[in-house]
Amino acid sequence: MQVSNKRSLGNWLSLLSQTEIPVLKSTGEQLTALLEDEESMSARKVARIVLGDPLMTVKLLHYLQLHRPSHQYTEIIQVEQALLMLGLKKFYDRIPFQPVVEHLLEPHPWALIELGPVLERAARAADYAIEWAVRLNDLRFHEVYVAALLHDVAEILLWCFAPKDMLLIREHQIEDRTLRSQTVQEKVLGFPISELQRLLAKEWSLPKLLTTLMDDSLQRQTRVRNVTLAVNLARHSANGWDDPALPDDFHHIAALLHLPVDQVKDLVHATPVYQSRFDSYE
């Protein structure tokens, strides 16, 4: 297996925690267009655009945590609530829609193509998570939605800033579908991306509840298990519905939801993507 010239985990943590988080070009365009239509402007409409981009979502939550008033003891995860607390004017004035992901990856067009399915996977994981949260009578379903959406944000960032390494990882996984993701990541990068994710969340001072929901080691908690299973299902099904990991996924989801496995299969195939499920619960 070919190995790239590795930065250490500490180097990547320092670089990504000090670099302005990029956003998708379409996110900036949609937010700018909404700003020009003041009559229809609302926190809910802005939130829908923000939630269409995991990077813009984490950028907003990171900013809010950094500028949280000393008297505010409650951490905010729900994006619309965050926008109401910050104010739309401050959001537009203080959180730049730069740098742009597509501009960063102009020298690496194949990486941009590969990034698309990663973003789709994050959206699908969030849709699964909120669907199951509602079935489990979780009244704070917005929180598991955001946790699933941001679960792999470190991977998205590495596609932006280490496209050659990520392409190398992808090539090895295509060559051998039995390879575990963590094994390939450690070989190419020198560390598992999940560890970078954990450290970045801490460095960004993301809400404690959010980091808990994204912590796969806390599987005894139903809400954490919901997020983890949603992320796993989105990841494995992205390889095709014949992926060998899917039978185990269906079994674990059936246990979570207290449903027969066949019903779970029907359920996951029927779950819509791209926030249509989120919108229906607002």
Image: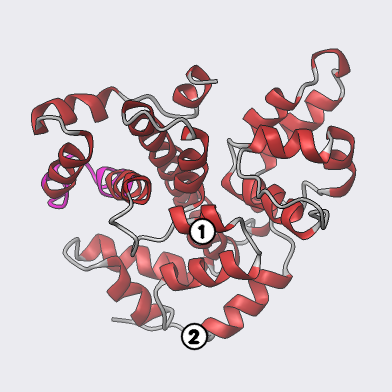
Secondary structure of the residue carrying numbered label 1: helix
* Kind of residue at badge 1: Thr
Residue 192 horizontal/vertical position (percent)? 39, 74
* Kind of residue at badge 2: Lys
Q: Which mark is residue 6?
A: 2
Residue at position x 44%, y 82% in the image: 4
**Left or right of 141, for residue 20:** right
Count of marks placed on residues: 2
Which quadrant of the figure has residue 187? bottom left
Q: Which residue is nearer to you in this view: 201 or 122?
A: 201
Instruction: Tell me the quadrant of the picture where the C terminus can be found.
Output: top right
- The magenta region covers 234-247
Residue 205 horizontal/vertical position (percent)? 65, 64
Secondary structure of the residue carrying numbered label 2: loop
| Crowdedness near tag 2: few (<14), some (14–19) or many (≥20) residues, C-alpha within 10 Å | some
| Crowdedness near tag 1: few (<14), some (14–19) or many (≥20) residues, C-alpha within 10 Å | many
Q: Is residue 36 magenta?
A: no
As drawn, 179 above or below 113:
below
Residue 224 horizontal/vertical position (percent)? 37, 51
Instruction: Tell me the quadrant of the picture where the N terminus can be found.
Output: bottom left
As drawn, 146 above or below 279:
below
Whole-number angstrom distance, CA of label 1 to CA of label 2: 27 Å
Residue 149 horizontal/vertical position (percent)? 49, 45
Give the residue number, with chain letter if any, for mark 1: 211
Q: Is residue 241 magenta?
A: yes
